[in-house]
Amino acid sequence: MKGERLKGLFSPRSVAVIGASNNFGKLGYHVMKSLVEGGYSGGIYPVNPKGGEIWGIRSYPSLSEVPHPVDLAIIAVPAALVPPVLEECGRKGVKGVVMITAGFREIEASEGAELQERVREIADRWGLPIIGPNTFGFVNLPFGINATFTPEFSRMERGGVALVSQSGGFCHLSGFLAMKQGVGFSKVVGLGNRANVDFPEMLEYLGEDPDTKVIALYIEGIDEPRQLMDVARRLRGKKFVLAYKAGRGKKGDDASRFHTGSLAGNYRIWQGALRQAGILEVNSTEELLDTAKALSSSPLPHGRRMAVLSSQAGPGLIASDRVEDEGLELARFSPQTQRRINDILPPLAIRSNPVDTGPAWYDPGAIVRILEAVLDDEGTDGVLFLNMFASANLRLAQGVREYMEKREELRKPVIACFAFPPGVWDEEVRRMDRRKGFVVLPTPERAARAMANLWRMKLLLEDGSP
Amino acid sequence: MMEARLLLGLDALSFLGGKGFSILRTEFARDADEAVQAAWRLGFPVTLKVSSPDVLHKTELGGVKAKLRGEEEVREGFREIAEAFRARRPEGRFEGVLVQEQGDGVEVIVGTLLDGQFGPVLMFGLGGIFAEVLEDVTFRIIPIERKDARQMIRELKGYPLLAGARGIQVDLERLEDFLLKVSRLIEDNPQILEMDLNPVFLSRGEPLICDARMKMGGPQKAAP
């Protein structure tokens, strides 16, 4: 099992920070801050030839002088110093390395690529897995380590999503958005230049990770995509895998005298290959986060028939349009369901699908009973549940939250939107989001997309077609 | 590595026929008389196609005459093809024409290529403008499984045409078999570097390859 060797790296009992610093202008300062303020409970050993205390912790002039075993070495020294430091890591028996140092394959000068090759050679000789170089690091939230130069990643919520990104920038972009949108993570990993740890090995490791349910990939380009496909195929039915492929540029080979050759852009082949491997492709940062969130917290729908409930008509219409655009259908309620709804709602608004729940504004209990009625309907596979605040329905979010707390786990996905002035429903929404299969997303359009992606994932896993 | 060479026309069709693919019955004719005799043997209507090592895209050159229903039309077709060739390729080598039984059904394109990153790749799409202008084609990495073949067919925007929207019945299971067979062909014959089967006619029976061209190379490195 190739993923095995990453266990010590991602769950280290002790960490050395080589290039640790008290100077805000050095990355080694921010790495120390992440470890200390992130509450890492293992041993922290700052390494700096100047000696003294760093972040209030005794430092050592070199790694070999640390009198304890070290599982993880975080390297943040200038590129030229990296080879001897890496040799020292090998001799010390370090289990894995995060190499934050930049100036390798990513730079224009050819020395960068040569240095990376040397690093890879040393690391392979010692059997050392390297995350990086040119990475911001990783966080392992359930384990409680923030091994990055961005302390704020410790504030991320815990959850079932592992984000593996070729770009540290993308982790920052999506990570901070995720904090605002209630996406919970098991791990966030910036692979950087991938000296010797690439997507396939990460996938192997995460395939065995009990904290991870969804693996979200941000891919720019990799050398051996077939290996990634092979591992992903083995994870089918075990983990959900989705990917955002960037760097789509350039289409086929215009010089090809064959039709096939001129039509085959690299990105077109990627699209086919991802689907073939059971990886769901997404097309934006929001879609990656929304879909990962829904997959980690919702049951998959058994069919494409959706109910749309909306506290005002317009957003319900938007959601209904999107349901159909996305290849889903609006459910037709059974006569019994329709009677249950009609008993609750006066004939003042649309009561079939979409259901305008507006007339029940003053009574959160009534809205909850409508939700329950459509969930009970055998002809409904999922619910888009839209709730716009109005002064008159102030208690709606509380009513829904209380209902969700009482009821059993949902067996069909409910993706909800709550629109409200800041400060009004935040706490109620936070308390019901991602619990018992209930997921909250910002807009009807994004809710419909995420619902469609749950359905697409279901089809992908069942060998069906889109 | 040996230099790549092209396999065109009857050579490509015969190669595929030898690998168990169904191809439209095709004969070579040097002149109009031979073309007429071939047409009688194949049965009208027939299609004539220019045969020359110097022509890769026959239609662009006026080198294809389809649905010829009698002796006169075959003679006239031959004359037009020969004239078009002389006008546009005065330096070229005109060998004659291929006389082919008239294909029928939905036209599709099936192709393969050797991608630098992914290795051998399979492409499938609807023929003619659907592939060339609308780029309604789909790709998979070779080898494919049956579910991949199913998805390739169903994810085309033009899928309704295969599902009978124009009243032409297509046996979709045989089409899946066909895609799987092309995938196996490339696995078993890595010397095929690039291949267009274009068009392939689909109807109720076995998919029929109408035209093919291949780039053959020496022993290649295995897929990455």
Image: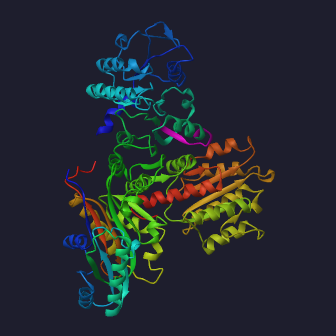
Residue B103 falls within the magenta-colored stretch: no
* Vertical order, A2 against A310 (above or below): above
Report x, y in % for residue A392: 80, 53
Looking at the image, which is closer to me, A347 or A76?
Answer: A76
Residue at horizontal 38%, vertical 20%?
A: A82
Q: Is residue B24 left or right of A452 when viewed as pictured?
A: left
Q: Where are the magenta residues, as a range?
A: A178-187
Q: Locate residue B82: give its quadrant.
A: bottom left
A280 vs A196: above or below? below
Is residue B106 visible from the viewing direction of this image? yes
Q: Is residue A179 magenta?
A: yes
Please name whichever residue, A98 or B86, is drawn nearer the observer in this view of the structure. Answer: B86
Marks counted in the figure total: 0
Q: Position of residue B64 (x, y in %)?
A: 36, 78
Residue with the most extreme right position = A391
Question: Who is closer to the viewer here, A417 or A63?
Answer: A63
Rendering coords of residue A190 (x, y %): 46, 35
Residue B22 in view here: no
Say whether residue A342 is left or right of residue A437.
Answer: right
| Quadrant location of the N terminus of chain A in the rendered image | top left
Q: For this rendering, which residue is in front, B59 or A402?
A: B59
Q: Residue at x 51, y 21 (%)?
A: A27
Examine the image and state in which quarter residue A357 appears. bottom right
Image coordinates of residue A403 in percent, x first then y, are 64, 52
Q: Is residue B68 above or below residue A127?
A: below
Left or right, A437 with respect to A393, comes to: left
